[in-house]
Amino acid sequence: MSVLQVFGPRPLEIERGEGCYLMDTAGRRYLDFISGIGVNALGYGDPAIVHAIQDQAARCLHTSNLHSHRYQRELAARLAQWSGLEQVFFSNSGAEAMEAALKCARALANRRGRTRHRIVALENGFHGRTTGALAVTGQAKYREPFAPLIPDVIFVPANDVDALLDAANENTIAIIAETIQGEGGIYPLNATFLQAIRDLSSARDALWIADETQCGLGRTGERFAYQAFGLTPDVVVTAKPLGGGLPLGATIFSGEAASAFGLGMHGSTFGGGPLACRVALAFLEQAEHLLPHICQVGHYLHARLREMAAHCSLIREVRGRGLMAGIELNVSGDPFVEQAREQGLILNCTHGNVLRLLPPFVITAAEVDQACDVLARILGGRHSPDRTRSRALAGP
């Protein structure tokens, strides 16, 4: 075996995908309710994505950032419009996008003459696997093998305003938070806590860095999840579905935050190439049109999951928003991932006991029914053969 063994068992060998389904080399078909961990938001074989890849591949794959191209400019303008911010740096992943955000916080603080550089982040948060991103990831199992990391990072519980107030002292240069924690168990931040982040960041002359790598770009039915609260961060980190399946991350800055960078202070060889940017534009165009659908089908998904939870002793809580859902169990979730796969449903387990659902944006109510029927069978919940009431939530 020549592949570094860091991923654990991978029982399926995938041959191809079609719509919301994956097919393995044995010809078996699976409903994909994790969509490549949130990457394949338009499912598989989307015609616009395929066309963009084929046409651009015949034109130009790579230029480096020694040259400019129209798709990078157009994508930056679109992301600025989507986010309410001003300038964009392109990279290859969410972790690299977070690195740019961390460097921004340090550079801006240094420019302002700050001598202490406290960063406040959240317990159970996850921001990537580079050493900088790990330093602000609030799960010791990821950090400890690589210690020591960036110093003076303080972790507070999500939605604990008092703890946030205590931690975010005058030395704070950034507050970092996923609007909905993904790897940490699908925990949404509430309006009071997000407002406290915004207020404290402003009061401390610090940056609010919103990590929307998993919950952004339409996943919740808004362009970005923070927009449901009428607030705007100073920096937004995003990636996963942006490249339509190709590696692409973006860090989006307010004008003030962007002023931290000068020529040569940051860069990327592959970030923002013509192929990835053109595909990303195709993705954003379709995601914009799908936002009402995401809200509608997401509402239906959560209604079905809550109905199941009411009749299943294994389910402790259902959390999330839009097409992002976590089913917290009172037992380990790993055996149920395997059982679901055996019945043709792909999902995964995060935080030990949370079944994570990130279906493609093009999922239908009928496919939600299919997934929930599998979940009900393996978890021992009650089936819902008469779905007239529930389907009314999803509309026509």
Image: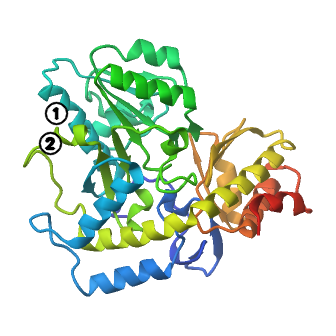
Residue at x-position 49% and y-position 54%: 223
Q: Is residue 384 left or right of residue 186?
A: right
Is 65 drawn above or below residue 278 in the view shown? above
Query: In the rendered view of the protein, which quadrant contains the N terminus?
Result: bottom left
Is 109 drawn above or below residue 169 in the view shown? below
Q: Is residue 319 left or right of residue 165?
A: right
Residues at marks 1 and 2 touching, judged by CB atoms closer than 8 Å: yes
Q: Position of residue 14 (x, y in %)?
A: 52, 73
Picture disc at residue 370: none
Residue type at tag 2:
Phe
Task: Determine which residue is flagged by label 2.
Answer: 261
Q: Position of residue 99 (x, y in %)?
A: 26, 43
Q: Position of residue 140 (x, y in %)?
A: 43, 29
Badge 1: few (under 14), some or many (20 or more) residues near its Cα, within 10 Å?
many
Residue at x-position 40% and y-position 28%: 121
Is 269 drawn above or below residue 279 in the view shown? above
**Figure disc tally:** 2
